[in-house]
Amino acid sequence: MSESEITDDNQLTIEQAIVNLQCEDLGLRIYAAWWLGRFRMNVPEAIDLLIEALADEADRTEAGGYPLRRNAARALGKLGDCRAVSALIVSLECDDFYVREAAAQSLEMLGDSSCVAKLIELLDNPIASTASNIEPEQPFDAIIEALGTLGATESIPYILPFLEHPIPRVKYAAARAMYQLSEDPAVADRYGDRLVDALSNDDLQLRRTVLADLGAIGYLSAAEAIGNTMAENSLKLISLKGLLEKQIQLSTPPDLTEGAVRVMALMDDLL
C-alpha cells in the first residue's frame, strides 16, 4: 500500500490533506494539520505547507489562540524534518501559550541545538507565579524538557531555580532535565530520586506526569517504584518501556543487562 492510499476513518488521503491545508475552511485546515502529524505523513509539500501555517493569521479564535498553528507545530515535530527548526524558533514568540508549548516540544523532537539559545532566553523570571494553581507565563516544563533532551549543559544555571518552582510539573521537569545534564552520576541520581519521591503525590495527574518523566530519562532505580505506583498499568508499562530501552542500549547482544531482565519481569507482572 502506498502512503497516498493510507486513510483514517474519514478516508482522508495525503493528497486531500494537502488540498485541505490550502482551502478556506479553517476546520478542514486544522484537521489536515493534525492528520499529517498523527499518521507521520512526511512529504515535502506537506512540510512546506505546515511551515507556512505557523505564520497563519486567519485561524485566531476569540480568546486569542491559534488552533491551526498549534496543530502545525505539533505535526512538524512528529514529521522529523529539520527544515522546520527556524520557523519553530520564531513560533516561540507567538502570543499563544500553546503554540509556544508545541514549538518547544517539537524542537525537542527534532534535536537541533540551534534552538538552545532561544529556549534559554525564555527561562526568565522562573518564580513569576506565586501559587501552584496559577499558570506560568511560559510553558516552562516544555522548554526545560527540551533543554534536557538536547543536552544543553549551558542551561544548567537557568534550570536550577525551577527546582523550587511552585507548580509541581515545572519542578519535576527541572529534576528530569538536571538528571540528563548532570555529568556526575551521583548528582544525577539525586535528581532521579526526587522524581521517584514524587510518585507518591496525592494527585493522579501529577503521578502520571512523573511516570512519563522517569520513562524519558530511563532511570533504572525507579523501576520498582514505577511498578507500585497508584496509576494505570498502561502508563506504568510505557514508563518501564523507557527504562528497558535504555538498558537495551547498554547491553551487548545477544546478552541483556541485569537491569533489562529486572524491568522485563516487572512489565510481565503488569500484563
Image (tube, helix red, strand yellow):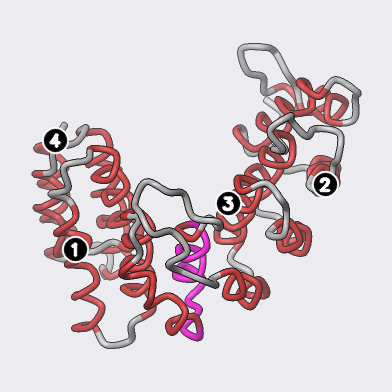
Which residue is disc 3 drawn over? 101
**Would you say residue 147 sits in the magenta stretch?**
yes
- In the rendered structure, which disc, 3 or 4, sits on the residue that comes first in sequence? 3
* Three-letter code for the amino acid on which mark 1 is drawn: Leu
Left or right position of 185 against 153 = left
Q: Does the residue at mark 2 contact the one at mark 3 (Cβ under 8 Å)?
A: no
- How far apart are labels 4 and 1 at the CA level? 17 Å
Which residue is disc 1 drawn over? 220
Give me the residue at 19% from left, 36% from top. Answer: 231
SS for dot 3: helix
- How far apart are labels 2 and 4 at the CA level? 42 Å
Is residue 255 among what the camera can see? no
- How far apart are labels 2 and 3 at the CA level? 24 Å
Of marks 1 and 3, the one in the foreground = 3
SS for dot 4: helix
Which residue is disc 2 drawn over? 44
- In the rendered structure, which disc, 1 or 3, sits on the residue that comes first in sequence? 3
Relative to 64, residue 6 above or below:
above
- In the rendered structure, which disc, 4 or 1, sits on the residue that comes first in sequence? 1
- How far apart are labels 1 and 2 at the CA level? 39 Å
Q: Which residues are magenta?
A: 142-154
SS for dot 2: helix
- In the rendered structure, which disc, 2 or 4, sits on the residue that comes first in sequence? 2
